[in-house]
Image (cartoon, rainbow, N blue to C red):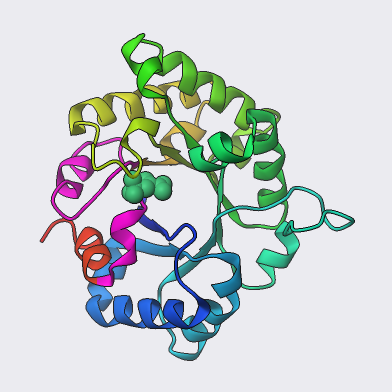
Amino acid sequence: MRKNLIVGNWKMHATHLETIQMVQKLSYRLEPSDYERVEVVVCPPFTALRSAQTVIEVDHLRIGLGAQNVFWEEEGAYTGEVAAGMLAKLAVAYVIVGHSERRQLFGESDADANRKVGAVLEHDMTPILCVGETEAEREAGSTEDKVAAQLRVGLQGLQAGAVEKVVIAYEPIWAIGTGRTASADDAGAVVTFIRGLVADEWGPAAEAVRILYGGSVNPGNIAGMMAKPDIDGALVGGASLDPDSLASIVRFWS
Ligand code: PEP
């Protein structure tokens, strides 16, 4: 059984003090039974990870911690970069890799994503590998080709036992931060295609690997996404900045 997973990507929002408040507010709005049904993770900026770790530990919260990026080298002269081992020491459990904003604004490639996935797994954390097509690619009918290429390179060199630990986030680029969402049918079809591709390439890992949808998810559209059998959760940007809205997304069935 794959456990549902809702991940808040706060992007470049929230100071460390705001992060403490946001994490606490989210925890006040969730019941113990919610955590039985859904794994809840927030990804604040690097500068807030230590504060988030502290509030989670001191208040015994069941909210998981994620980072938004990582560099693949262990240490060295890489000004401005953060290593996987540094994140692991902060009790970070998840690391977003290959987000389309990293790809589009910072020139990250599929090969970069592959190195990052490897570094994250090496430190016993879970990579959330983001894939997705542009609007032009969708209109040209090349969504599956694009996503397949991103996955084949992003997961290159991994055995099935490693692939099943990865979380894949299908995020159509035209739906990120735009308020436009893929229909649940369209998102479900691409996610089913992704699971099939994992089955073809890595066999049994396909049943275990969790696949999220991301792209303007909100409390009003999450239930439709979660009704698709292959969608195991969501990567949520804008709507995750409001604890009320993130809590409503976590409680998608109510
Ligand atoms: C994201 O940042 O991964 C994302 C899906 O953003 P939004 O929910 O704002 O579209």
Farthest residue, direction front: 105
Res 154 → quadrant: top right
- Residue at x-position 35% and y-position 10%: 141
- Residue at x-position 68% and y-position 44%: 116
Residue in the foreground of this view, choosing between 134 and 141: 134
Residue 133 rendering spot, x and y as whole percentages: 42, 25
Q: Is residue 155 visible?
A: no
Quadrant where the C terminus sits is bottom left
Q: Is residue 145 visible?
A: yes
Q: Is 90 situated above or below 237?
A: below
Farthest residue, direction top: 140
Residue 60 rendering spot, x and y as whole percentages: 44, 86
Stretch of the chain drawn in magenta: 214-243
Q: How many marks?
A: 0
Res 174 → quadrant: top left
Residue in the foreground of this view, choosing between 28 and 79: 79
Is residue 175 highlighted in magenta?
no
Q: Is 63 situated above or below 157?
A: below
Is residue 239 highlighted in magenta?
yes
Farthest residue, direction bottom: 58
Residue in the foreground of this view, choosing between 2 and 144: 144
Residue in the foreground of this view, choosing between 42 and 35: 42
Farthest residue, direction left: 254
Q: Is 23 situated above or below 134?
A: below
Residue 220 rendering spot, x and y as whole percentages: 13, 51
- Residue at x-position 48% and y-position 85%: 55
- Residue at x-position 49% and y-position 90%: 58
Residue 253 rendering spot, x and y as whole percentages: 14, 56
